[in-house]
Each structure stands twice: as C-alpha cells, then as structure tokens.
Amino acid sequence: MSEKSSVEKADIATVESGPKQEVVVPQSGPERDAIVKRLKRKLDLRLVPYLALLYLFNALDRGNIGNARLAGIEEGTHLKGNQFYNALSFFYFGYTISQIPNMFIMKKVTPSVLVGITMVLWGVCSTAMAGAKNYSGLVAARFFMGVFEAGVGPAAPIILSFFYLRHELAWRTALFYGSSTFAGAFGGLIAYGVSMNLAHEKLAPWQLLFIIEGIPTIFLGIITVFLLPNAPETLERWFVTPEEKQVAIERSRSGHNTDTTTLDKRQLLASIKDYKNIFTCLIYIGLNIPLASYTSFLPTIVSLMGYKHAKAQLMTVPPYACAIVCVFAVCWNSDRTRQRGLHVAGSALVACIGYILLISSGNVKANYTGACFVAMGLYPIIPLMLSWVANNNVGHTKRAVSVAMLNTFGQCFATVGTQIYKSPTAPRFFMGYGVCLAFTVVMIVFSLGLT
C-alpha cells in the first residue's frame, strides 16, 4: 500500500508546522487516542506540577506573615494598634489594582515572561520584609508584593485552558491551586523548624522565615522565563513529539483558543455584560473574605486555643492536610460529573459547619475541628471557580478579562477579611466568625442560582 493511500485510510489531517515540513496526525481512532493519552500524561507530570510549584511559593510568601506574627514581627517592627491588620490589607490593595493590567500585559508579552519576572520581583519584596524596621517599611513591601503576585494566580488557569478541554480542567486546576494548601502546611512546618532549630545573633526568627522562603522564589522566577511553555506551539520545551505537539494545537483550537489579537474589544464588552460573570464574582467575593482571614489568622486562632509558640506553628498543619484531600477529591468528582455549581455549594456548606462549631463552642477540640472543616470547605472552591469561569468564556480576551474580574472583585473584598479578627474580640472572635459564616451562605445561594 502506498504512503498516500495509507494516509487517506487513517483519516489524517495535514498541518503545516514549519517552513519545510508538515506533520500529519490521525483525527480519530486508536492511534489518535494513544497520542492524546501520551500528551496528557506528559502535561500532567510536567506542566501541572511545575505550575503548582510556582503557586506553592506564591501562597507561601503571601501567608507567611501569619506565622511571622507568632515569631515576633509585631515587636520587631514596633507595630501598634491596628497596624498589623493594615499591613495585611495593603497586600490586597496591590493585588487588586494590578489584576486587569496584568492580563493585558500577558497579551503583549508571553506568559512565561510575565510569570517569571513577577516571581522574581515578589521574591525580592518577600525577602526585603526581613529588613523592615517599622510599619512603613513593612507596608511598602506587602503592597508591592501584592502587585507582583497578581501575575501568577490569574495567568495559570488561562495557561491550563490552552492545553486541556473543558471536562479536564477542574482536576488540573485543583492540582495547581491545591499547592496553596500544601503551602499552608509547609509554611507551618518551616516556621516550626525555624523556631526550634535556627538561631542567629543578628536576625530574629521572623526575619529568617522571610529570607528562607523568599530567596528560592527569585531563582525559580528566573528559570520560569525560559522554561514555561506559552502555548501548544511552544511545547518543545517540555520534550513532546511533533505528533503530540500537533494534537495539542488541535485540542486548543477546539477550545476556541485561536484569537491572536492583542485586545478584542467585542470580547472585552462581552465579558463585562455576561451575567454569569457577575454571579461568579459575587461567589468569589463570598469566598475571599473568609479565605483571606483564615490564611492570615489561623496561627493566631490556634495559639489562642492554648497551643504556644512552636507548638502553635505545628498545629496549623493538620487543617491544611485535611483541605488537600478535599481539594483533590471534590475537583476530581466535579470533572467526572461535569458539574461545578453543586460542588461549590456543597463545599461552602462544609465551611458553614466549621464556622458554626467555632462560634457555638468554647471547647478546644470542637474549635479545632471547626478550623479543619473551614479549610476543607473553602479551599476546593478556588479551583472550582477558576475552572468554571475559564469554561464559560470563549476566546483569549474574554477569558483573560473574566478571570481578572473574578480576582479583582474577590481580592478587593479580601481586605475585609484582614480587619475582622481584632485582638479585643479574642479568643472567641464572634465578629470574625459571624462575618465569614454570612459570606459562606452567600456562596451557597449564588452558586445554586447560577447552576
């Protein structure tokens, strides 16, 4: 049989992949299925873990100030009154104002350049917090760290949407955002290790914490500029075959990831007018208020349960460990059933139970169980929402703007979460728990409405 007749029988497409060669791949049948399987395996073992590693450092540098509080940052920087809470808020101010600009920058430059450079810059800011001598220095470092951290979180779901189909996205997004729960557990372990085993004549434990967690981010950002693939067309960086690369390109086209304009004004207006995006923004607001407070104040809450110093750092690990299991299980089932809204509502209900336990009981075991339930309910909602928005918006511009809108509104209201656990309300924190409980109910209502 001639090569020509063999090609026709295999039902293949001929696609130009270079100036002097062309790659042909089957459009159906066992051979195509085998190529898709190999491609997804390589992406699952290379691209997704690498993005997860980036977000682990993102979450680690963002949340380490909660551990630094137990290690003495308030005394070291001479903070008074509400200054610690205000320093937390300034991070979200910077994060909020840079969301949409970062999405437009990503259209101008490649994702690898945006993500890599912003990583280097926020790593510098995180490390510089070790040198803060007063409130002004701490606030400046936190603000600019927020500006630069906004480059990774919104960009990653968009990058993943270039390589995965709709029903494959939530599980992979969960693997990416699940690293933030690893960061919570990992951060507690690092803080415990610093408190117990490291001593320095000139550096306090909280300063060592920022240095140890900030410097690796800088080096990882430099590597990312050269390593992260920007689109299926650049998958050579991840050692795929020409056939696998072509299949990746075709899968991306099937997801309508083909517009090449810098900014499509029609898609921009469509993303603003789409009522589904308004609903998802309201759900994300309901998520980010309790989430911001949880990541910032869990070490404080645990210490007020009776655990002290290094033991309190260590006891922040189990709630995040519980959350990791729930993130993967819930998002896997969401992809399996191709259903987002019901899983968001169910997760929010688990968080509600946690806040009810925290409010209603002064018992240490009940409170600690409640803290675990809150983490188990809140963290799965992050990848569910971002994959939901990526699924519902077609085209680079509409998808990028919609994700940026989601994060802008969510992080804007996250500043509320940094202000509701004031010291005078300790140890029961009725105001903080009550506000968070109310917004978890908001999530349930709007997610069911959108479903």
Image (cartoon, rainbow, N blue to C red):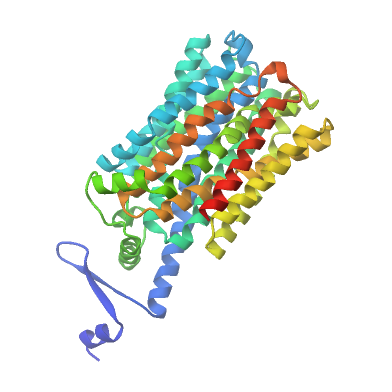
Residue at the image point whose x is 37% and y is 58% from the top: 239
- The answer to which of 274 and 305 lies nearer the viewer is 274
Residue 336 lies in what quarter of the image? Answer: bottom right
Residue 151 appears in view: yes
Examine the rendered structure and indicate whether residue 17 appears above or below residue 262: below
Residue at the image point whose x is 66% and y is 36% from the top: 437
Residue at the image point whose x is 42% and y is 23% from the top: 144
Q: Position of residue 232 (x, y in %)?
A: 32, 57
Examine the rendered structure and indicate whether residue 401 appears above or below residue 15: above
Residue 252 lies in what quarter of the image? Answer: bottom left
Residue 23 lies in what quarter of the image? Answer: bottom left
Q: Position of residue 356 (x, y in %)?
A: 74, 38
Task: Answer left or right for 355 relative to 77.
Answer: right
Residue at the image point whose x is 57% and y is 32% from the top: 292
Quadrant in the picture for the N terminus:
bottom left
Task: Answer left or right for 230 relative to 33.
Answer: left
- The answer to which of 232 and 177 lies nearer the viewer is 177
Q: Position of residue 275 (x, y in %)?
A: 42, 48
Q: Position of residue 69 (x, y in %)?
A: 64, 20
Q: Looking at this rendering, what residue extends furthest in the bottom direction?
A: 1
Examine the rendered structure and indicate whether residue 241 appears above or below residue 206: below
Task: Answer left or right for 303 relative to 101.
Answer: right
Task: Answer left or right for 207 relative to 122.
Answer: right
Q: Looking at this rendering, what residue extends furthest in the right direction?
A: 363
Q: Report how many numbered discs are placed on residues in the image.
A: 0
- The answer to which of 354 and 180 lies nearer the viewer is 354
Residue 122 appears in view: no
